[in-house]
Each structure stands twice: as C-alpha cells, then as structure tokens.
Amino acid sequence: MQVTINKIAQGGEGIATLESGRTVFVDGALVNEVVEIEIYRETKSYAKAKITNILKASQDRVEPFCPHYFECGGCNLQHLKYEKQVKLKEDLVFDHLKRIAKLDLSKIDILPTETDSDTSYRNRVRFHVSMADKKIGFLKKQSDELCEIDSCPLLVDSINEAIGNGDIFKAARLNMFNNNSRGNYIQVPVFAGDDKLSFSNDRVKITVNEHPFSVSANVFFQSNPKLLSKLVDYVVSKIDCDSVMDLYSGVGTFSAFLPKNTIAVEKQKDCLTLSKINAPNAISYTGEVEKWGKKNKESVDIVVVDPPRTGLYESVPKLINKFGAKKIIYVSCNPVTLARDIKEFVKIGYEVKEVKVFDFYPHTHHVECVVLMSNVQK
C-alpha cells in the first residue's frame, strides 16, 4: 500500500490518509515522503503502520547513528536532522496552542528554544534486565521483547560504564525481591549524580546552578542537567515577589531557588522527604493539589506549576485563581494537556504572555515548555 505523508503527529509518527478516508499513523515517516506501508493495527477511526519501502525520501532524512534505533523502543526521531527535530517540536507546541487553546500567537512573545548537546545528555534511565540470559536493554518498539544493548549514545558515560561493569546486574538481583519487574524482566532505575550512581532508592548528590540536590533513581528529577540549569534560570527570572506557591513541587527542583516560605505542595511522600532536604526554606505540604487546594485558603501572587503528563486536574485552574495568583508559570512536558489547561485559564481571566521551548529529550518526540500567564483582571 502506498501513501504520501502530509504531517507529523505529536507522537512523532507520520500522518497520511488512506483511500477509505481513514487516518494512518506511520512509524518513522517524514513530511512529503512517499512510502509503501504495512498496517499492523486497525481501529474504526485510524490505523497504525510501518514502512516497508521508501519511494521518495525527505531531504531532511538522515541515517540514525544508533545501531539499535530501528529495534529499540526509546528514540523515535533519529532519522530526522537534529535542527529539524527542534523545528518540528516548536511547530507542534505552537499548533496545539493555536488549535486547542485558541491563542493568537502574534500577541505572544515566543522566546528562542533552548538546546544543548543532543548526545550523552541523559542521566536518568530505567533498564530492563533478563537475569535468565544475562541481558540488559530496553523494550523493542511495539513489543514486550528485550532489545539488548551494551551502550546508549544518549546516556551519560557513567551509566554506560555501569552496563559493562556488572553494576546493573547487581542492582537487578536486589530488585528481584522488590517485585520491581515487568513480565520476565527486572526493572532497574538508574540516576547519575555528580560522583556516583543511584540504583532505586540510593541517594546521590547532583548540583544544579551551584545548589546540591539529594535525589534517588526512584523519584522524578529532570534527566538533562544542562538544560535543567537553563530552565531553572528562566523560571527564577520571572519571580518578582516573595509570595510564591510551587504546585507539584517534586523534590524541590524549583522551590530550592524560590523565595523563603514558598508554599510547596507534592503528593508523593518520597519526593517531599527529599524536598525538605533540598528546599528547607519552603513550607511543604503533602497532598494531591486539587484536594489540598480545597481545604486551604492561601493567598499568593505567583504560582509555579509543573504537573505530570496528564496535566492539571479540572478544578485546579479555578483553585489557582482562588489563591489570587497574578502570575502563573506553567512548566509542561505535554503540549496537548498544556494547551487544554491554558484554554481553561484564559476562560477565567488569564492571558498568555510568553512561551519558551526547551528540547530536553533530543531524538525523541518529547519536549519541555514553559508558558507565562498573567491575570488581566488583577
């Protein structure tokens, strides 16, 4: 079956239209390419397919540098020139803001995208380990089978060294007794600190903008240290008062740099334990933001919010408005839920002032972005 790719989806697949009118998502395809495909999944409204032959290749297509690329389920954009990856992610972010949030981008400051090295940048990872045949790797694309690796070009050197020196297998043996498994594989989370690696709950130190953080591999912490420094600088540059709230505060990544007595709210107790170490000057609360907000009558001028990929619970925008926030700094790893939430903020009186994209995850479709909003009614 032959199709022409007309755009790229949020997940990185090429999009084409079948003769039946159904949309087909094609793994590894680029805009304007003519490809022959094989459908491997069908629903009533769309199909999923893989390329069997490229009849007309994009001028932006390149040969992936990782030998495992076409098998491993990690990266999905290595076949696209890196500068074009950045442009693609920018376009997707702005398209969601226009189409979902109904924003007029001509009235918003679009700041330059932040990038850094596109290899050896990642210091947090989750390996799958087969103890039966002594293999380490990641799951294959569209599969629960293991793609064995001896190194990954996106990982920092210290984690790649651990693949070969036996440390991953040692951690896997310990995790066998913690039910930390998926199918036949033991999962081993690893985080690279300044001087040593964390396996699971081991705490290590990592320094961001001269501030030491205590972190473990079992809690969330941004996996691109160089860009995290730039992200923190940008967020902090927008803080112009002492009345601040940090929602979904995690291990205190932003709270550590925010004014004294910043109100930090995080539902994960393990994260909050570390947050009290990393951001001792913050006032920390444990709880789900939507439930905590209903019980508390706080008043703040600025709210920093950094939710998971699912975005904000539907009641949170109104809660933030109830807190009296004049300014919102929304940090997001999902442009779709970001745009959905911004639409709700606009309904209750907020106006988008700035948007800035950070390419935290080169060679994948994932992206981080920050939106600055002000309440035009306050």
Image (spheres, rainbow, N blue to C red):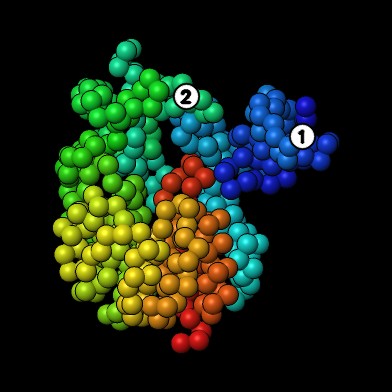
Residue bearing mark 1? 3
Identify the residue position indicated by label 2 in the image.
Answer: 144
Q: Earlier in the sequence, mark 2 or mark 1?
A: 1
Residue 317 position within the rendered picture, expressed as x and y whole percent measured from the top left: 47, 70
Say what amino acid the circle numbered 1 marks: Val
Would you identify the image quadrant in which residue 339 lies? bottom right
Q: Residue furthest top?
A: 133
Element class at badge 2: loop
Q: Which of these two is toward me, 185 or 190?
A: 185
Q: Please, is residue 156 above or below residue 235 in the view?
A: above
- x and y, in percent, of residue 241 in the image: 30, 81
The residue carrying pointer 2 sits among few (fewer than 14), some (14 to 19) or many (20 or more) residues within 10 Å by Cα, namely some
Most extreme residue toward the bottom is: 378
Q: Nearer the viewer, residue 37 or 57?
A: 37
Q: Which amino acid, mark 2?
A: Asp
Above-or-below relation of 157 to 166: below
- In the picture shown, does residue 272 fall above or below 20? below
Residue pictured at 39% horizontal, 41% vertical = 119
Residue 278 position in % (x across, y down): 19, 59
